[in-house]
Image (cartoon, helix red, strand yellow):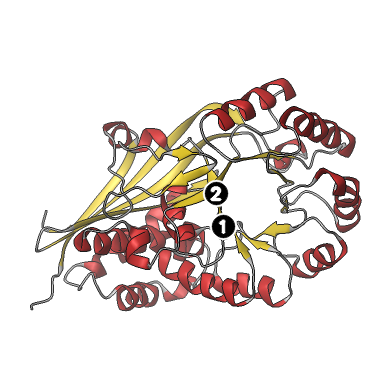
C-alpha cells in the first residue's frame, strides 16, 4: 500500500477577543495587565489522498505572533512528508529550527502542527483521538475555572459555580494569591459554604506566593478538603514545591507554565507535585505530552492538564489514572462543535479525531495566514 503524502499546509494567526477583561493574582500583584484576548496558531494539513487534520497552539498575552512566525519559517518542510510518521516529521521540524532550541516558542509553534497530524491520523482511522491512543474511559472528571477569577465579585463567583454544577460540571476552581491573603481566605470560605462539603473545590495562586506564605495558606485551609492547591510558588521552584507537598495534606498541583518535557522531569524527580498539569500546546504538542504522561504515570502522579479542553479531554481519557480536565468555554466561538458535560464529567465525543471544525467566526478573526504546497 503506497504511503500518503502531505500536499498542503495552511497556517493561520487568529486573535480571540474575551468578552470581559480577566484578572488573576498576577494582575493584582502588578505583574501583568488584565487579559483581553488570546492569540492562536492554527495548522490545517491536507494529504494527497484527501485526508485532513487541524491543530492549534495558543498564547495568552505576548507570544502569539512569535509562534506564528516560527511555524511560518519551518512549515514548508512538511510538504511531501508521510503524515503517519509523526515522530520523524516532528524531529525534522525541530532540526529546521534548531538554533532557537527545543522549548518555549520554538516547540509551541510545532505543537499546532503536531496536534494537526494526530488529528489527521485519528480521522483517517475513523476514531476519536482518545480511542486511537487507547482510552481508559469514555468520560473524564471536569472542573470549571472560568467563573472563579479575581475580577469577579464573590457573589458572581458563587452564582457561576452554581451554574457550572447545573450544567453537569463536577468541580469548581477559584483564583487566590492576592496581596492580602485574608481576602483569599474570606472568598474561599464563602465559596465552600455556598457549595457545601461534597463538591470538589480547588484553588489556584498563579505562582504569586513565596514559600512561607504558601505554607501559611496551606495550613490555614487544610480543613476545607481542597482537591488541590495549584501553582502556589514560582513554576520553576521545584525544591519549594517539594517541601510544600511534603508538609501539607492538601495535594499540590503545578506544571502548566513549563514549556518542555525536560522541565517537567525536574518536577517529577524532585517529587514537587502530587498532581501534574502539563499543557500539550505549551510542551510541544501531543507527541511530547505522551512522553511526559508515561513518566508521570510511572511516578504515580495524578493528571490534570491545563486549558485547551478540546485537546486535553482526549489525552486525559488515555491516562491510566483517573484524571481531571479543565473546563473553559472561552474557545467555543472558534469551533462548530461543543463538548458535553454530564454528571460531573466531560464526555469524549464520538467524532473522529479531535472532533472539531473551525467556525466562520474563527476565520473572521484571522489576522495573518500562509500556505505551503498545492491547495
Is residue 225 toward the left or the right of residue 314 in the image? right
Query: How far apart, in angstroms, are the residues tagged by discs 2 and 1?
Result: 7 Å
Residue 291: assigned label: none
Label 2 crowd (10 A; few <14 / some 14-19 / many >=20): many
Badge 2 is on which residue?
141
Badge 1 is on which residue?
323
**x 53%, y 71%: residue:** 292
- The quarter holding residue 245 reads bottom right
Is residue 80 toward the left or the right of residue 120 in the image? left
Q: Is residue 149 above or below residue 242?
A: above
Residue 15 shows in the view: yes
| Image position, residue 121 (x, y; %) | 25, 64
Q: At numbered mark 2, what does the secondary structure look like: helix, strand or loop?
A: strand
| Image position, residue 260 (x, y; %) | 54, 68
Of 43 and 276, which appears nearest the observer? 276
Q: Earlier in the sequence, mark 2 or mark 1?
A: 2
**x 91%, y 51%: residue:** 216
Is residue 100 toward the left or the right of residue 207 in the image? left
Residue 115 shows in the view: no
Is residue 119 toward the left or the right of residue 213 in the image? left
Of 323 and 69, which appears nearest the observer? 323
| Image position, residue 250 (x, y; %) | 79, 55
Amino acid at each position: 500500500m503506497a504511503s500518503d503524502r502531505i500536499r498542503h499546509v495552511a497556517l493561520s494567526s487568529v486573535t480571540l477577543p474575551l468578552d470581559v477583561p480577566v484578572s488573576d493574582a498576577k494582575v493584582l500583584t502588578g505583574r501583568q495587565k488584565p487579559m483581553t484576548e488570546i492569540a492562536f496558531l492554527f495548522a490545517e494539513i491536507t494529504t494527497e489522498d484527501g485526508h485532513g487534520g487541524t491543530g492549534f497552539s495558543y498564547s495568552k498575552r505576548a507570544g502569539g505572533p512569535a509562534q506564528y512566525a516560527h511555524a511560518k519559517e519551518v512549515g514548508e518542510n512538511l510538504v511531501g512528508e508521510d503524515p503517519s510518521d509523526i515522530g520523524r516529521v516532528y524531529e525534522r521540524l525541530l532540526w529546521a529550527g534548531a538554533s532557537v532550541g527545543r522549548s518555549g516558542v520554538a516547540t509551541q509553534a510545532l505543537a499546532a502542527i503536531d496536534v494537526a497530524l494526530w488529528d489527521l491520523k485519528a480521522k483517517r482511522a475513523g476514531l476519536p483521538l482518545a480511542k486511537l491512543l487507547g482510552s481508559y474511559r469514555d468520560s473524564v472528571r471536569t472542573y470549571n475555572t472560568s467563573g472563579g477569577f479575581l475580577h469577579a465579585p464573590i457573589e458572581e463567583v458563587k452564582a457561576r459555580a452554581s451554574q457550572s454544577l447545573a450544567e453537569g460540571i463536577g468541580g469548581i476552581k477559584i483564583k487566590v494569591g492576592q496581596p492580602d491573603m485574608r481576602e483569599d481566605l474570606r472568598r474561599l470560605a464563602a465559596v465552600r459554604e455556598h457549595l457545601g462539603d461534597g463538591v470538589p473545590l480547588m484553588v489556584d495562586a498563579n505562582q504569586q506566593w513565596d514559600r512561607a506564605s504558601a505554607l501559611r495558606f496551606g495550613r490555614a485551609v487544610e480543613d476545607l478538603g481542597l482537591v488541590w492547591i495549584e501553582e502556589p510558588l514560582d513554576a520553576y521552584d521545584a525544591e519549594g514545591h517539594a517541601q510544600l507537598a511534603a508538609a501539607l495534606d492538601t495535594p499540590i498541583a503545578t506544571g502548566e507554565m513549563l514549556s518542555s518535557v525536560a522541565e517537567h522531569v525536574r518536577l517529577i524527580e524532585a517529587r514537587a507535585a502530587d498532581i501534574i498539569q502539563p499543557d500539550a500546546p505549551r510542551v510541544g504538542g501531543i507527541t511530547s505530552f505522551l512522553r511526559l504522561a508515561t513518566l508521570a504515570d510511572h511516578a504515580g502522579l495524578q493528571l490534570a492538564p491545563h486549558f485547551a479542553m478540546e485537546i486535553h479531554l482526549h489525552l486525559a481519557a488515555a491516562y491510566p489514572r483517573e484524571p481531571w480536565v479543565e473546563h473553559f468555554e472561552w474557545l467555543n466561538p472558534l469551533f462548530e462543535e461543543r463538548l458535553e458535560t454530564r454528571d460531573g464529567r466531560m464526555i469524549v465525543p464520538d467524532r473522529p479525531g479531535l472532533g472539531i471544525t473551525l467556525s466562520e467566526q474563527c476565520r473572521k478573526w484571522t489576522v495573518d495566514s500562509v500556505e505551503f504546497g498545492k491547495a
